[in-house]
Image (cartoon, grey):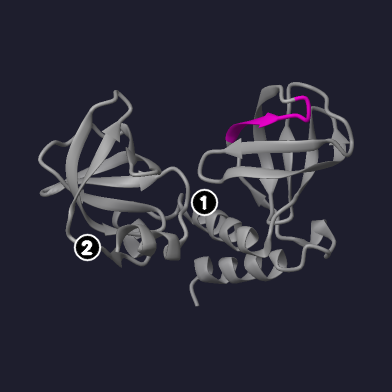
Amino acid sequence: MSNALHTLKELAVLGAHPATDQRRHRRVTLPLLGRFMRANRHEYPCKLNDISVGGAAINSPVEVEAGERIVVYFDHLGGLEGHVVRLFEGGFAMQVKATAHKREKLAAQLTWLINRDVLSGADQRRHERIPVEERTQSVVLDSGETLACQVADVSISGASLNMTERPPVGTKLMLGRLRGRVVRHHEQGIGVQFVDIQEPEALRRHFT
């Protein structure tokens, strides 16, 4: 079993038992930038220190209150909801409130993020590629321009699009409701990396 799959299995099993001591969940150091919303609906920038399927430690420019409800958003992870369980200098720790299904998805996202620095280019394509129906679709660039494309294949982390135009690498776009950015060009079009790791079944429903 690969290290990535082992990590996913371990994280998912731990996440299936939220009553377990939160510190026993595997902690992953991920310095991601994001933002969070307090109970008063005011939003602030923040930085993630570490995270598990059960909780996260976050650097914050403002003081929060123990027990306060927090909604936080990080790229690649999406939104997480929970409450403050511990305060420390310069930040706070929150316990993540999530269903078993959401914890399994978070485990998959963390596994991918753990391994993305050691995976490169073609290696990232080891994620299972999901065949899709051949039909014309469209992408919307961050400039607002809409371009026609065909999805050649898709995985939990990205897609290969056949298209005439090739937006520059780094261009942000929307493929349906999926946010992504251009990470490479190929002979038939472009490769797109999704901002958030997707669920395989949701992708199959969307593209097949």
**Residue 161 — which label?**
none
Q: Quadrant of residue 201?
A: bottom left
Magenta range = 33-40
**In-front residue for pair 15/7:** 15
From the top left corner, tell me how far across and down residue 54 is, in percent.
74, 55
From the viewer's perspective, is residue 95 above or below residue 153? above
Instruction: Report how many numbered discs are placed on residues in the image.
Output: 2
**In-front residue for pair 208/87:** 208
**Residue 113 — which label?**
1
Residue 135: within the magenta? no
Give left or right: position of 110 versus 149.
right
- What residue type is disc 1 on? Leu
**Residue 133 — which label?**
2
Q: Quadrant of residue 93?
A: top right
Q: Which residue is most to the right?
A: 66
From the top left corner, tell me how far across and down residue 5 is, in percent.
52, 70
From the top left corner, tell me how far across and down residue 1 is, in percent.
50, 78
Give left or right: position of 8 versus 160.
right
Q: CA distance from mark 2 to mark 1?
A: 29 Å
Q: Residue at x 60, y 63 (%)?
A: 104
From the top left corner, tell me how far across and down residue 117 is, in percent.
46, 49
**In-front residue for pair 133/13:** 133
Label 1 crowd (10 A; few <14 / some 14-19 / many >=20): some
From the viewer's perspective, is residue 149 above or below residue 58? below
